[in-house]
Amino acid sequence: MKSLIPTTLLALGAVALAAPSSLAQGTATPIPGFNGGELSPDGFTVAGQNGTGTFTWNPVTGFTFLPGTPTFPNDISENGLIVAGQVNDLVLGNKAPGFYSLVTGTWTSLGQHPSMGGGCPEFGNLFAVTPDGSMMGGMYWDGCVVDAFTWTQAGGVTILTKGAGGSGKLLALAGNGSGIAGGWGQGGALSSQTAFHWDAAGVLTLPLDRPANPGGLGDIRALSYDGSSFVGRDIALSGTTGYLNYKGAHHAIAANEANSISADGRIVGAQAGTGGPFGTISGYVYTTFGGGMDALSFFAQFGVTPAAGQVDFGSVSDVSADGNKFLVTSADSFFGEAVVITLPDNFTSLGGGSTGSTGISNLDGYGWLNPGLKAGVELTGATPSSLGILAYGASYNPTLLFGGLVGPVPAAGFLVFPTDANGSIDFTFTWPLTMPSGATIFAQYGVLDGVASGGVALSNTLQITGN
């Protein structure tokens, strides 16, 4: 990964101000009378349970209570279409894994374990659903032993291997529906909770097993969209902490547990403290490009502070797919309310790419462009092991060229980077303290590609606007 941003590029942005705007601030929307829940991948809908029943909530329509006996929802799909958790199965006479469909307006039970071995003390639970609702996963009781499983409408139930453990529990699924999953196992040869990771073929590994954590004690609580990164709790010899495994690299997080992760794996929500009715918890945010920070300090950078009368945020319990929305509980477990915090999105795709040997590549940004903060841009899906030319400028005048539209015209400059074996280019930078609010830069890659029109495949143009 590169760690630079050209001086000329920054100077250009400093003067690219048609009409300077005020500093973009974050917003906090409270969920009245509720302190918990699950956030949909788009960050718009929250699912939860209160004294009235199981509900979905959004800031436009408020609470929508779902029919039937209240059960706590464990996950929610895009647009709130699927709520996954438990249902009261009237045939079995007990709780079973199940989900609610907003489209049909009904709950569906997945019944009992395929072995028909009964339940102890219930029949199971769903803990994860992919954004499109096509795959779900959780745990089944088989007698008094727990099995992790996945479920699809077409294929039904697939029981996952338990390895050395007598029980396995699935807590998270990759968002792309590949079947990559995470959770934990316990029992049998595993005396303590041990992090389990299943690949797309169902092969089980213990990803935390290393000299600092013999046996790999801990769990996996959330995965990135493609399943290459995941977070959870690491019960190492030096003590229990949260962690991020980002594309195979282990990052320790200075919090008790990490709960959620953005689609690209770069942004993590976590919590420190003991919790419970008499304990104290404090939220924590970790990013691969900026490191870790307590939630109070992190959100203060965007003008967001706790509700009146409170001094801290509680757990950062969920993060939207794009990493710009956070479900944050209150540190006051008795009277506090959860909030959905929305941060500014500083990157906009303007399209215009052209097809190369690997299709149309994508240029996107991550992080937030407040003065002094770290952020980055990444090209993906380009020609592997080639050269990418980054054009940048203060003006956007889309011009037909190389089978697509070149956006930064006239270009103020060009930078050359090699693409890696996956066809990616990634670099981070610090948005300067002197950068005026509203500074805008337009950037676009052209990648050398013999299949493309004119030998150059264009990415989309990315508009980069500072706060």
Image (tube, rainbow, N blue to C red):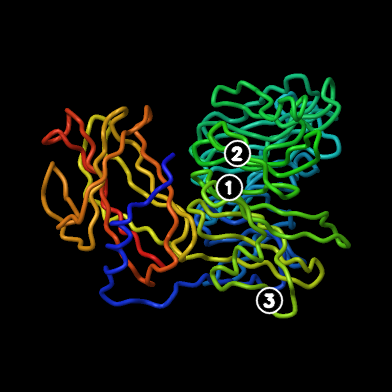
| Mark-to-mark CA distance, 2 and 1 | 7 Å
Labels 3 & 1 near each other (Cβ < 8 A): no
**Res 226 visible:** yes
Residue on which the image places disc 1 = 261
| Mark-to-mark CA distance, 3 and 1 | 25 Å
Image coordinates of residue 328 in percent, x first then y, are 65, 62
Residue on which the image places disc 2 = 230
Q: Helix, strand or loop at disc 2?
A: strand
Q: Tell which of 188 and 323 is nearer to you.
A: 323
Q: Three-letter amino acid code at disc 2?
A: Phe
Labels 2 & 1 near each other (Cβ < 8 A): yes
Residue visible at 17% across and 33% down in the picture: 452
Considering only vertical position in the picture, is 30 above or below 285? below
- Who comes first in sequence, dot 2 or dot 3? 2
Residue visible at 58% across and 43% down in the picture: 129
Considering only vertical position in the picture, is 44 above or below 163? below
Q: Is residue 1 left or right of residue 76?
A: left
Q: Tell which of 189 and 249 is nearer to you.
A: 249
Residue on which the image places disc 3 = 307
Q: Three-letter amino acid code at disc 3?
A: Ala
Considering only vertical position in the picture, is 256 above or below 185? below
**Res 100 visible:** no
Q: Is residue 261 left or right of residue 388?
A: right
Residue visible at 79% across and 23% down in the picture: 165
Q: Three-letter amino acid code at disc 1?
A: Ile
